[in-house]
Image (cartoon, grey):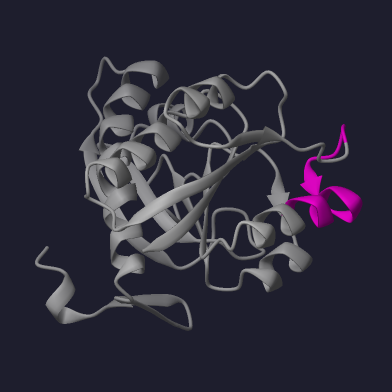
Amino acid sequence: MVRIGILVSGRGSNMVSIIRACNEGRIDGEVVTVISDNLDAPALAKAHSLGVEAVYIDPSPGKVVLKGEGETRYIEHLLSRNVDLVCLAGFMRILKSGFLNQFKGRIMNIHPSLLPSFPGLKAQKQAVDYGVRFSGCTVHFVDESVDGGPVILQAVVPVFQNDTPESLAERILREEHRIYPEAIQLFAHGKLEIKGRKVFIKEDAWKG
């Protein structure tokens, strides 16, 4: 079983989805720890209520990038829990080389757009303002780029003419809760292989 550590900053809806998927057997794994860079994150209480260790670790306040002593504290905590996979679930800090090298090929994120379209903040607003007809979400491995790592899974949702960023976000979130656990399950079974910019899924693992 894969041992999962989740990094959060806010409400933790994807965190809850992953924990429940583990509890229900849809992921052959266990969330062994949740770390937040925000002492007041609702995700911390939610994780505790689901019986999962959840801690606040000072990331070095005021910095968008996780580095220095803050980065070291995060790495040491995850290593102490023997984490196999790190999942970002609304974690609002940028990971740099020290963290990425320590967990190379073992960090996932989910983003509310069809990457490479609309990376960064407020992706749903970007999609509505641009006038696209379809948006969605992307699970990807994390590298040093912002929302630019190799794509694992994507899901498409329509964008309606009367959509607001909030209504689109709600529709996308339902798909996030579906495909993030699917991607983790593929990882748990050793079905994902990164070759350059592409992630290959072994044929016996995925039926589309």
Q: Is residue 115 visible?
A: yes
Depth check, front residue: 152 or 14: 14
**Does residue 106 sit above or below 5 in this rendering?**
below
Q: Position of residue 89 (x, y in %)?
A: 51, 40
Query: Does any portion of residue 130 appear in the rendered image?
Result: no
- Furthest-left residue in this view: 207
For the record, the magenta segment spans 61-74
Q: Whole-percent x and y of residue 114?
A: 36, 49
- If the image is split into quadrants, where does the N terminus sit? bottom left
Question: Quadrant location of residue 107?
Answer: bottom right
Q: Residue at 48% of width from left, 83% of height from top?
A: 196
Res 93 → quadrant: top right
Residue at 53% over, 72% down: 105
- The percent position of residue 206, horizontal first and vertical second, equals 15, 69
* Residue drawn at the location 31% of the way across and 33% of the way down: 172
- On whether residue 80 falls in the magenta region, the answer is no
Quadrant of image for the C terminus: bottom left
Asked if residue 72 lies in the magenta stretch, the reply is: yes
Image x and y of residue 137, in percent: 35, 44
Q: Nearer the viewer, residue 47 or 119?
A: 47
The residue lying toward the viewer, choosing from 154 and 48, is 48
Q: Determine the residue positioned at 45% across, 47% down.
A: 31
Q: Is residue 124 above or below residue 139?
A: above
Q: How many marks?
A: 0
Q: Is residue 193 left or right of residue 191?
A: right
Residue placed farthest to the bottom in the image? Answer: 195
